[in-house]
Amino acid sequence: MRHRVDIDKMGMLPSHRRSVLANLTNALILHSKVDTTLMRAKASQRFAERLITLARRGDLHARRIAFSRLRDKEAVDKLFTDIGPKMQNRAGGYTRIVKLGPRRGDAAELARLMLVE
């Protein structure tokens, strides 16, 4: 039974899924937006929102947790020095998804995941 199970497996093994989410979130943090499929954007949005909440805390333990998830020092530094303090007065909803329409090759629904300014 799937009671209260809300993870979308995206047709991937857990290790591959973690890598894809980490890479999408790294790109989001470093470039403030990323274009991907709608399913991946929704999964990455949850992942990124949790990391930004950690960055709002700003302590060493939160930074270490974020590094264990992202595995990119540059992205963690930008998350904690730029994005975290900027989102300090915001109660949530740090990211936005905008649908872009179907992809030409396989008609997959594309979306842009971006940080809210």
Image (tube, grey):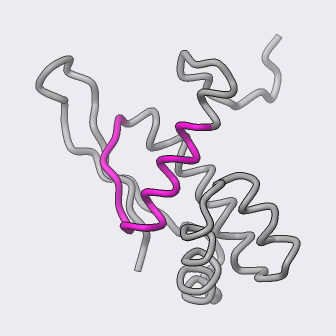
Does 20 appear above or below 32? above
Task: Please state the horizontal and vertical placement of residue 72, each as a whole percent of the image.
Answer: 60, 60
- Residue displayed at 53% across by 51% down: 45
Task: Please state the horizontal and vertical placement of residue 13, each as a whole percent of the image.
Answer: 64, 18
| 68 displayed left or right of 85 | right
- Of the pair 79 and 109, the residue shown nearer to us: 79
Task: Please state the horizontal and vertical placement of residue 31, each as a whole percent of the image.
Answer: 36, 67
The quadrant of the picture occupied by the C terminus is bottom left
The residue furthest front is: 73
Question: Hey, which quadrant is residue 7 in on the image?
Answer: top right
- Of the pair 117 and 23, the residue shown nearer to us: 23
Does 34 appear above or below 101? below
- Of the pair 4 and 9, the residue shown nearer to us: 9
Question: Hey, which quadrant is residue 91 in on the image?
Answer: bottom right
Q: Main secondary structure of the magenta part?
A: helix
Task: Please state the horizontal and vertical placement of residue 28, each as a whole percent of the image.
Answer: 44, 60
Magenta region: which residues? 19-37
- Residue displayed at 85% across by 78% down: 60
The quadrant of the picture occupied by the N terminus is top right
